[in-house]
Amino acid sequence: MGDGKKTPAAGEMLQGTLDMLILRTLVMGAAHGHTIAQVIEHTSEQALEVEQGSLYPALHRLEDRGLVSAKWGVSENNRRAKFYQLTAAGRRRLATETSRWRRMTRAIGLVLDEPRTGDANE
């Protein structure tokens, strides 16, 4: 995992992006931090590496904002773990941020795209 070839690492992602990815992961149901990181890494085809130093502060921030709730439970390894769950406010925030993200990435794509025939008359 730490081969240095994965970019960007979650620590290099914009804070709001990591928050959005965590919220999206929790749509599938409650999960503990290690599982959340694994899902993001797996779903991104290992392109995004989520480090604990970024993940847990983000989870605490989301909990403080009422976007996720947390309770202690037992992990699949029979260890005590904090499980995070998306709240109604978290679902609303995810919808808003996803829409904003799609508009932004579309706009950036338009700027980066090759000029279309007839577009560049100057």
Image (cartoon, helix red, strand yellow):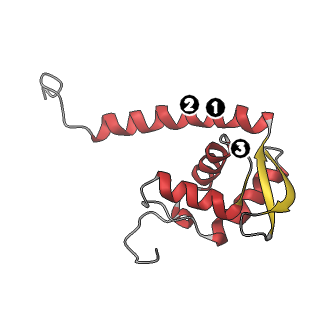
CA distance separating discs 1 and 3: 16 Å
Number of other residues with Cα within 10 Å of mark 1, as a class: few under 14, some 14 to 19, many 20 or more: some
Checking the image for residue 29, the label placed there is: 3
Q: Give residue 75's quadrant in the image.
A: bottom right
Q: Amino acid at mark 3?
A: Gly
Checking the image for residue 95, the label placed there is: 1
- Name the secondary structure under disc 2: helix
For this orientation, the residue located farthest to the top is 118
Q: Nearer the viewer, mark 1 or mark 3?
A: 3
Taking the spot 25% from the left edge, 38% from the top edge, the residue there is: 113
Residue 70 pos. (x, y %): 84, 53
Taking the spot 41% from the left edge, 64% from the top edge, the residue there is: 7
Q: Give residue 99's quadrant in the image.
A: top right
Residue 25 pos. (x, y %): 62, 47
Residue 44 pos. (x, y %): 45, 53
Q: Earlier in the sequence, mark 3 or mark 2?
A: 3
Q: Does residue 111 appear to the left or right of 118 in the view shown?
A: right
Tell me whether circle 2 and circle 1 mark residues in contact (CB < 8 Å).
Answer: yes
Taking the spot 72% from the left edge, 69% from the top edge, the residue there is: 77
Taking the spot 48% from the left edge, 34% from the top edge, the residue there is: 102
Q: Nearer the viewer, residue 43 or 20?
A: 43
